[in-house]
Image (cartoon, helix red, strand yellow):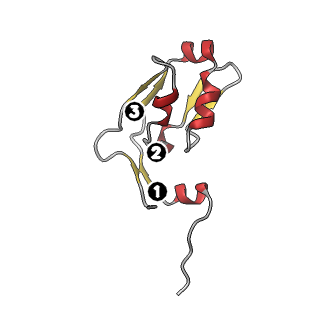
Amino acid sequence: MTYYKPTSVTERLAGNIYEVDEGNSHIVVNQDMARATGAGKLLERVCPAHVYTEEADKSVSVEYAACLECGTCLAIAPPGLLKWHYPDSSMGVMFREG
């Protein structure tokens, strides 16, 4: 029997299931602070799911539906930059890859 094992991070992430709480983001970025500190690039680099994107005006857009809820952004973000909480019950990521 042939068994296919995903090899890239993108393929592994595609195996997860996401229950999205539309219109109720669990991540809020203090945009004034993001513009002042340039922290958007840092968030872009460290987030394994590529949830954050720094825009041309240094604001940060958030694709919260793709969040892995790993907390990496919280560990590196300057205090006060992010308001982050786990999604409501039964929402968020369901991991399918071990």
Q: Crowding near pointer 3: few (<14 within 10 Å), some, many (20+)? A: few
Of the residues shown, which amino acid type is indicated by label 3? Asn
Q: Secondary structure at mark 1?
A: loop
Indicate whether 16 appears above or below 71: below
**Quarter of the picture holding the C terminus:** bottom left
Q: Secondary structure at mark 2?
A: loop
Q: Which residue is mark 2?
A: 68
Of the residues shown, which amino acid type is indicated by label 2? Leu
Mark before the other along the chain sequence, 2 or 3: 3
Residue at the front extreme of this rendering: 75
**Does the CB distance between marks 2 and 1 fall below 8 Å?**
yes
Mark before the other along the chain sequence, 1 or 3: 1
Q: Secondary structure at mark 3?
A: loop
Q: Crowding near pointer 2: few (<14 within 10 Å), some, many (20+)? A: many
Mark before the other along the chain sequence, 2 or 1: 1
Give the spatial CA distance, label 2 vs label 1. Answer: 9 Å
Q: Which residue is mark 1?
A: 16
Q: Position of residue 85 (x, y in %)?
A: 36, 31
Left or right: residue 6 versus residue 72 is right
Q: Which residue is mark 3?
A: 24
Which image quarter: residue 9? bottom right
Of the residues shown, which amino acid type is indicated by label 1? Asn
Q: Which residue: 62% across, 32% down? A: 53
Q: Position of residue 38 (x, y in %)?
A: 64, 19
Give the spatial CA distance, label 1 vs label 3. Answer: 20 Å
